[in-house]
Image: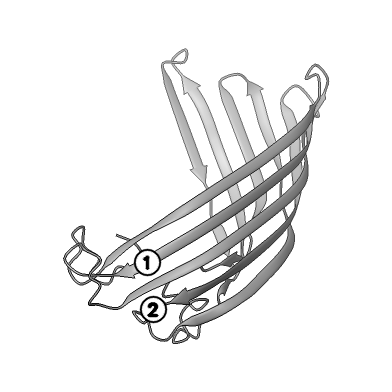
């Protein structure tokens, strides 16, 4: 069942959800990687992503059928997403045992949605409309690692994650339903994570333990 299925059961009783979609995705990534033989190892990259989604989603019917005697709502939409990122990540060997590491990724994303809805299953019709959102932010990490030999690694890292804004194209959502007054643009989220870990192999590699503490703060 879908998010618009009112009874939330595997068998359609009160209504049925069905539809068609056409999804086209293109992505490309280029990387420049260090040889790996020196004290400083790095990765530089450029990433591109494009998505085009054409969706026609219907809600209505009863007992698993599209009953024409009941109201049926059809939401037709086109969602386009374009994402571009550049990034750099590296590790510097201060000594044979100590390393510092860090990286950053710069993000830029554009999303647009256009569509309309006909039918009265979720209230009155919704005329054609368009919305869009642009988002720019960054993610990154920094840390230190101590590895006196191949069987022991102790590390601490701080990282920042980010999930950009999104668009809600649900048939009963605010973009298609005049009765829903919520914002069709979903808010972005930022997370700060702190990781302290101890990894060690015992008894000539027969046993390995991984102990990690990783508190996070989400906004």
Give whichever of 77, 180 is nearer the camera.
77
Give whichever of 126, 87 is nearer the camera.
126
Q: Are marks 2 and 1 in contact (CB under 8 Å)?
A: yes
In the rendered image, residue 97, in percent from the top left (x then y), is placed at 71, 25
Tell me the quarter of the picture where residue 98 sits: top right
How many numbered discs sit on the rendered protein? Answer: 2
Does 145 sit above or below residue 111?
above
Q: Secondary structure at mark 1?
A: strand
Taking the view exactly as shown, the residue that stands out farthest to the top is: 204
**Residue visible at 25% across and 66% down?**
66
Q: Which mark is residue 119?
A: 2
**Residue visible at 57% across and 62% down?**
78
In the rendered image, residue 53, in percent from the top left (x then y), is placed at 56, 55
- Which quadrant holds the C terminus? bottom right
Q: Where is mark 1, residue-wise?
A: 58
**Residue visible at 60% across and 44% down?**
25
Crowd band around label 1 with a 10 angstrom C-alpha radius: few (<14), some (14–19), many (20+): many
Q: Is residue 164 visible?
A: yes
Does 38 sit above or below residue 28?
above
């Amino acid at each position: 069942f879908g998010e618009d299925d009112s009874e939330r059961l595997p068998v359609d009783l009160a209504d049925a959800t069905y539809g068609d979609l056409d999804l086209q995705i293109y992505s490309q990534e280029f990387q420049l990687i260090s040889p790996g033989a020196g004290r400083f190892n790095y990765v530089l990259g450029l990433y591109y992503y494009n998505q085009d989604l054409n969706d026609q989603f219907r809600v209505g019917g009863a007992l698993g059928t599209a009953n024409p005697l009941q109201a049926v709502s059809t939401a037709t939409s086109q969602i386009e997403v374009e994402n571009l990122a550049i990034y750099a990540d590296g590790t510097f060997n201060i000594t044979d045992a100590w390393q510092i590491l860090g990286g950053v990724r710069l993000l830029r994303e554009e999303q647009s949605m256009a569509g309309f809805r006909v039918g009265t299953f979720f209230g009155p019709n919704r005329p054609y409309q368009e919305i869009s959102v642009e988002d720019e932010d960054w993610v990154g990490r920094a840390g230190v690692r101590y590895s006196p030999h191949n069987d022991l690694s102790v590390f601490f890292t701080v990282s920042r994650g980010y999930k950009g804004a999104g668009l809600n194209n649900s048939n009963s959502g605010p973009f298609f339903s005049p009765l829903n007054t919520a914002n069709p643009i979903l808010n972005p989220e930022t997370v700060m994570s702190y990781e302290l870990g101890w990894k060690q192999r015992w008894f000539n590699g027969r046993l390995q333990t991984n102990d990690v503490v990783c508190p996070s703060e989400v906004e």
